[in-house]
Image: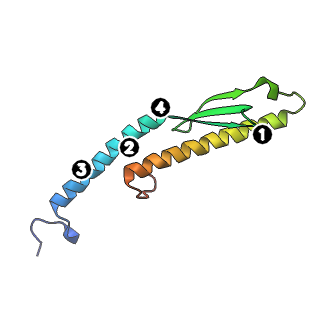
Amino acid sequence: MARKGGFPGGMMPGNMNNMLKQVQKMQKDMEKMQAELEEKEVEASVGGGAVKVVANGKKQIISIEIKPEVVDPEDIEMLQDLVLSAVNEALRSADEMSAGKMAQLTGGMNIPGLF
């Protein structure tokens, strides 16, 4: 015999509507957060400021600045290492910023694949 007014497992339609509203709100909040992250920037510099990299919250590199005195045609490897280190640090900072915003949005819940 079928039960009236409910779903299997005892979930009532009202509860499902509330959950759906919460998911929709979270989705809107995430879209807003992603737009905000695109506008926010992080900066990393290495070699005492010899190389500076700026990235946004979407992990896109915005700019790379290299001081002229660091450019030594005899030591290209050092410049490459500095640029690589600065880019990786900027992307790490962008990840941390995104993770912090996500934690605010989800209340610390770990929801894989959400962001």
How far apart are the alpha carbons under marks 1 and 2? 35 Å
On the rendered structure, is 101 left or right of 82? left
Residue 107, located in which quarter of the rendered image? Answer: bottom left
Bin the neighbour count of mark 4 within 10 Å (Cα to Cα): few under 14, some 14-19, many 20 and up: few
- In the rendered image, residue 62, in percent from the top left (x then y), is placed at 59, 29
On the rendered structure, is 51 left or right of 90? right
Q: Quick one: SS at disc 1?
A: helix
Q: Which residue is mark 4?
A: 39
Asked if the residues shown at circle 1 and circle 3 are in contact, with their CB atoms under 8 angstroms apart, the answer is no
* First in residue order: circle 3 vs circle 2: 3
How far apart are the alpha carbons under marks 1 and 4? 28 Å
Q: Amino acid at mark 1?
A: Asp
Direction bottom: furthest residue: 1
Q: Quadrant of the N terminus?
A: bottom left
Q: Amino acid at mark 3?
A: Lys
Mark 3 vs mark 4: in front = 4
Residue 81 disc label? 1
How far apart are the alpha carbons under marks 1 and 3? 49 Å
- In the rendered image, residue 5, in percent from the top left (x then y), is placed at 10, 65
Q: Which residue is mark 2?
A: 30
Q: Amino acid at mark 4?
A: Glu
Number of labels in the image equals: 4
Q: Is residue 30 above or below residue 40?
A: below
Q: Report the front residue among 95 and 18.
A: 95
Q: Residue 115: in sight, yes or no?
A: no
How far apart are the alpha carbons under marks 3 and 4? 28 Å
